[in-house]
Image: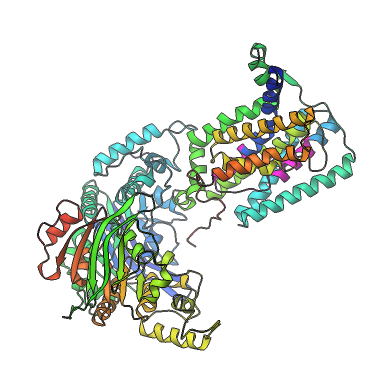
Amino acid sequence: MSTSIIEQVQVKELVARGIVKQFPGVLASDHVNFDVHSGEIHTLLGENGAGKSTLMKILYGMYRPDAGEVLINGTPVRFHSPLDAIRQGIGMVHQHFMLVPTFTVAENVALGLPSSRRVVLDLDIVSRRIEELAKTYGLHVDPQAKVWQLSVGEQQRVEILKVLYRGASLLILDEPTAVLTPQEVEEFSETLRRMINEGHAIVFISHKLHEVLALSDRITVLRNGRVVDTVLAADATKEGLARLMVGREVILQVEHPEVTYGDVRLAVHGLSANGDSGLPALRGVDLEVRASEILGLAGVSGNGQKELAEVIAGMRSSTSGQVFFDGTDVTGSLPGKLLDHGLSYIPEERMVDGTVRDFSVEENLILKDHHRQPYAHGVFMDFTKIASESDRLIEAFDIRTPSRHTPLKSLSGGNIQKLILARELSRNPSVLVAAQPTRGLDVSATEYVHRRLIEQRSAGTATLLISEDLDEILNLADRIAVIYEGRIMGIVERGNVDVEQIGLMMAGVSEQTTK
Amino acid sequence: MTWAVIVGILSSGIRLATPYLYAAVGETIGQVSGVLNLGVDGVMLMGAYVAFFVALRTGSLSLGLIAGAGIGAMFGLIMAFISVTLKAEQGISGIGLYLFGLGLSTFLFGVTIKNVQTIDGFPDLAIPALSRIPVIGEIFFQHNILVYVAFALVPIAWFVLNKTPFGLKVRAVGQNPEAADSLGVNVSRVRYLTVTLGGMLSGIAGASLSIALLNTFQQNLTNGMGFIAVALVYFGGWRVSGVLLGSLLFSTVNAVQLWLQVKGVTIPSDFLLMMPYIVTILVLAAMANRRVNAPAALNKRFERGES
């Protein structure tokens, strides 16, 4: 490709042999063998903590292995920093985007590279090269646009362009589809296919099984730092992969027992609200959730889901419309008041709105009820009671933590989510708003969260489940509402779901005509 | 108020903008890379003292200027070491640097110069032809060399920050150092450079007071000008053009205030002296919500995520 501006070899084959990496207390890579060659997508699959990230960071020069070797086209290589890896033709797209939001696309791409005009920037030339690359790989994005104005899918294209622009022939993609909408995933896989056809090699990291099966040529499953198996995608099944990953049978589809619905617990009438930018995000939303019912809210990210959850939880004010809990108008009530009404809330941003990073596990568990029985008597806190209740919740919700005093920030994402579940569900809520409850969680943690939500449903809780993962909604919900640009496009009963129709409503194409 | 008075006020407004421009442009470059240096006033005092002392002893204004710039760069380097290498809280280390500069310049003045003396500073340099244009010439083209350089600095700094690969790195490091680091940009090196450069310009700002504008040195000569320079960076929205506008507004209000004092208006001079500061506070309060251009990583230490 003439568009590459750094001279580098094309990676025809990368082989990692006997990689060992020891961290204090954990053997993150235990004699791992892995290889990938030009023209193939090789997926690394594994639970959180299985050693995917460690291996990836070794391949990209961020970690140095304690033992083992990496060979590129048969020659051993040693990386001291990502820069060495970049020079060898390896590029990486991080799960958390590494972009400067106030810069244009071209500026983000040009950052750190020498200019063809030496001391003066050559952004016009960079832009032209970006457009050529965009055309070759179907990565359409305006080089002049500021990154903060782009959708998440477009930002990801910028990340891939950055890597391709630097002439990478081996791309490491860390959970690239986690943030994409179904349509964007489709475009993304098209891009991957084009890159493969151009002779690139791709290491793909994911735990979404159906995508892994659809996209990969080969799949290597890691567990506890060891390679469990490497299989051809063509021979693999979802169930088989899940079993390899977790080491036991996994129930991918949770049971959905018959229940009798009760009275309407949560009702939202004509609700409108503005988003952070001050523009309308909700435009007259009507929803009702009954006791023992899970109402799933499906939709592409950024169509008002976040704002709806925040208004119901009392964290954002509405511009018109009402919210009712058990028939009582609670519109505009403060969060504390809503807690007294029996609301539990699993926020989308678990590290920002759900927990306090620097507090201990125990302190995070009592956040919402620290001021009342049994944790407090008047102005005094009952530390004995707090300790015993915390230990009980840690046990009951299987929160993996060294102790109840451990700071929250040292827990894994899955365990933090279990902690939030423990806090929210132990309050025995009348209404539960669960926003993206399994985002970023691995298979076993997801299975666990799903089981708990169904248990809570059987216990009579009215649940509003907001998720961008359509499979999750199809699995759990009794009824499915689809939101698009702040409006409910339609509500479908579990019994007669037409995925095609839901997809169209999510894209805002068709509004439900019947009912 | 006559024509002559207005021309006089505007002309001294241009002159008085000089120290603010050097200091605020230097501080802008540092802040755009994500380092807040509150010690500007202390660095200016050191620059002013050293430049004056060297000029007084050697008789050479150029040597004085170089020495002032040099001590400023040294103080910038100290700030970079504390905030980038030692990763100390930027705001507090800046205040420390200010107090150090204030104390050291007072002490050295007491030991070496002892009483207030004056020198002949950089002379006014009328630009041929241009200076003879009526009104305009008198306002803009009859100043000393340091005034012209200060104004020339504005487009140069703009060009470097916005049109060069180095400027791109500086801005990236101030907005998202992790992203810059992942592309092989050396975050620490960029910040060392910008903060040292900022210190050098603060040193020149001080020198412009002691050997070009006031032509003397005494304890706390700057009287808080360095803090105003920091405020001007916010005022200017981290753009050098905004900093230029702010410096001019501030120095012109100052010139009016000086004129009122000279005229012997019956307002107590203490109130007149407050005028520029009150204007600054009002403008800053009015702009409080306009932080669109603010460097996202300002005042945050950068640590690499991996081992």
Give residue A427's quadrant in the image: bottom left
Which corner quadrant holds the N terminus of chain A?
top left
Give residue A128's quadrant in the image: top left
Given residues B47 and B253, the one toward you in this image is B253
Q: Is residue B29 magenta-colored?
A: yes
In the rendered image, the vertical position of residue A479 relative to residue A390, given as above or below: above
The answer to whether residue A29 is left or right of residue B83 is left
Which corner quadrant holds the C terminus of chain A?
bottom left
Q: Position of residue A168 (x, y in %)?
A: 34, 47
Give residue A325's quadrant in the image: bottom left
Q: Is residue A73 visible?
A: no
Q: How is the image coloured?
A: rainbow
The answer to whether residue B107 is left or right of residue A140 is right
Q: Position of residue A457 (x, y in %)?
A: 25, 78
Q: Is residue B147 magenta-colored?
A: no
Given residues A215 and B242, the one toward you in this image is B242
Q: How many marks do you count on the picture?
A: 0
Given residues B144 and A196, the one toward you in this image is B144
Write the start and end of the magenta stretch as one range: B25-51
In the rendered image, the vertical position of residue B235 relative to residue A92, given as above or below: above
Given residues B153 and A369, the one toward you in this image is A369
Q: Residue at x 58, y 43 (%)?
A: B284
Q: Is residue A260 visible?
A: yes
Q: Position of residue B114 (x, y in %)?
A: 90, 41
Q: Residue at x 36, y 51 (%)?
A: A91
